[in-house]
Image (cartoon, grey):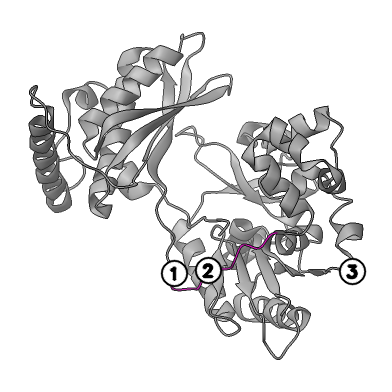
Amino acid sequence: MERTILHVDCNKFYASVECLYRPEIRDKPVAVGGSTESRHGIILTKNEIASKYNLTVGEPLWKARAKCPDLIIVPPNYPLYLRFSRLCRKIYEDYSEYIEPFGLDESWLDVTGNQQTGEEIAEEIRRRIKSELGITVSIGVSFNKIFAKLGSDYKKPDAITVINRDNYKKIAWELPAGDLLFVGRSTSKKLAYYGVDTIGDLARCDINFLKSILGKNGETLWLFANGLDSSRVRHKDESEDIKSVGNSTTTPRDLVDEGDVRCVFRVLCESVATRLREQGLKGNCITVSVRDTNLKSFTRQRKIKNSTNVSTEIFDCAMQLFNENYNWESHIRSLGISVSGFDGFSEQFDLAGNAERREKLERLEKAVDVLKMRFGNYCVQRACQLERRDLSGFNPHDEHIIHPIGYRVS
């Protein structure tokens, strides 16, 4: 039986919810953006009126204001967005048990075998969300997840697009290659260098050529472009395996020396280690990300000998990676740290007593976890955090929202 997959995308989600709750700004250009004071001053999303001024997601707020002096900027209210995301999901559950989120504002639904057609279900969902929740959605209907997502992006806002086996070459193949899921900016530039500009160009490429320039991802993109995506939509109660645990932050001021970096990495590593222990995980692959004040960024990773959930060991590896790869040509704007490699872990005992030291550190950090749970995040702090309070006064464990984003081929 031919599958029927829907991809539902809430239009301008954050801005739509804000305008719903603030009638006085509905007819004005509105953007949801981070705090200028804490340096998270970028556009997260904007309403349709603001889109007319060529504002882009990720654009600094000062640049957006230069384009649109009347722009109204509101801070994000994640608990409210999470509530609306759950309300949308409740509507989806009336049509399928197979619902897979892709961020707060997007979901795939597998409605195969339903008495109604995919387009009829999409139209009903579109009307219900508009009537019951007061926001709009765009929905793609297709025979696989990739083309369903292309369909939801094809016409906006408040629209339905059907991409089937009869019309996918006419619709999908004429779109830019960058519109295909997993074709990011770097991959798009590389494809364009070889004259691959559209999804159709990608589909007509020799698969071995794509593998030679893009590796395994080249084969995946060729399959996607040719409508051969067979990945399933997960059941609504199925949880995805955790692949990594991480935190990052844009710092309240530029980091100008190693002491600044150590302070911020300490806070991030303690948050990541706490979250690892909460999940019962240990990892052996440490990844750091660095972005400087010129917005140039890089990531580096390293496997360590023994899996860990101890912040000191994560921190030591992070600083090694940083010092080996950063030359301080510019000051630093943001840092990130993540731990992965959870495919089973074992302790290797040695004469140097490293395993015993790790056990002691883990017990110590678990005791600190209990203290912070009882008396607050700042009841126990390291000396470096006290010396640089302007950099250490954030709590990524509690304050940073982790969005339920997931996509896997299986």
From this view, report whether residue 196 is shown above or below residue 3.
above
Distance between the alpha carbons at the discs numbered 3 and 1? 33 Å
Q: Cβ–Cβ below 8 Å for labels 2 and 1?
A: yes
Identity of the residue drawn at 57% across and 59% down: 102
Q: Which residues are magenta?
A: 229-237
From this view, report whether residue 281 is shown above or below residue 263.
below
The image shows residue 10 at horizontal and vertical percentages of: 65, 64
Total residue callouts: 3
Q: Image quadrant for the C terminus?
A: bottom right
Q: Is residue 98 left or right of residue 379?
A: right
Q: Is residue 60 left or right of residue 189?
A: left
Which residue, given by chain and number where applicable, does mark 2 sit on? 234
From this view, report whether residue 156 is shown above or below residue 373.
below
Question: Quarter-wise, where is residue 227 in the image?
Answer: bottom right
> Within the magenta stretch, is there residue 404?
no
Provide the major secondary structure of the magenta segment: loop
> Within the magenta stretch, is there residue 232?
yes
Give neighbour class at mark 2: few <14, some 14-19, many 20+ (Cα, 10 Å): many
Q: Which mark is residue 224?
A: none
Identity of the residue drawn at 56% across and 73% down: 88
Which residue, given by chain and number where applicable, does mark 1 sit on? 238
Identify the element where label 2 is drawn.
Answer: loop
Foreground pick, 160 / 253? 160
Marked residue nearer the N-terminal end (3 or 1): 3
Identity of the residue drawn at 75% across and 56% down: 48
Which residue, given by chain and number where applicable, does mark 3 sit on? 166
Question: Quarter-wise, where is residue 134 in the image?
Answer: bottom right
Identify the element where label 1 is drawn.
Answer: loop
Foreground pick, 241 / 346? 346
The image shows residue 223 at horizontal and vertical percentages of: 73, 52
